[in-house]
Amino acid sequence: MTNTTDKRLISGIDIFVEAPFECNLPKQVGTLTLSHISSRGTKLKGAALEKTILDVGWLCARYTFENPLNNGAEADAAICNLVQKVGSTYKWSSLIKLYSQDGKTLFS
């Protein structure tokens, strides 16, 4: 998996894994966060998010960070770790794509 993120241009990154229903994400701002929006709109973070991935088997999440130049490396590391973990656990690597807000694919 190659990281082609240009931190100067990215202010938010969505992670989508194919799911049996639509997942609509609200726009978020703030420091680096990873959250999951379930089909019922429940927002989960951290351990609860990981448990949901394991239980439900799909992921729809957004990373946001206020200052991409300062937090970009941390964001990249967190994204890489999550994608590798989920991809290796469920063989989902081919289904995971990360997009910037302008729709460019960052990872695939």
Image (cartoon, grey):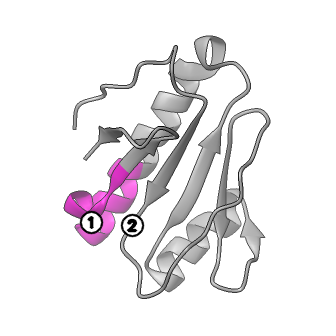
Disc 2 to disc 1, C-alpha distance? 8 Å
Magenta run includes residue 48: no
- The image quadrant that residue 51 belongs to is bottom right
User: Residue 90 in magenta?
Assistant: yes
Q: Position of residue 84 (x, y in %)?
A: 33, 49
Q: Which residues are magenta?
A: 83-97
Say above or below: 70 vs 95: above
In the displayed structure image, the side of residue 19 where residue 88 appears, left or right: left
SS at circle 2: loop
Q: Is residue 65 above or below residue 29?
A: above
Which of the 4 image quarters holds residue 52? bottom right
66 or 74, nearer to the observer:
66
From the image, tell me which residue sits under label 1: 92
Question: What amino acid type should be assigned to the residue bearing mark 1?
Answer: Trp
Helix, strand or loop at mark 1 = loop
Say left or right for 96 vs 14: left
Mark 2 touches mark 1? (CB < 8 Å) = yes
Query: Relative to 87, is 40 above or below?
Result: below
How crowded pointer 2 is (Cα within 10 Å; few <14, some 14-19, many 20+) is rated as many
- Lower sequence index among marks 2 and 1: 2
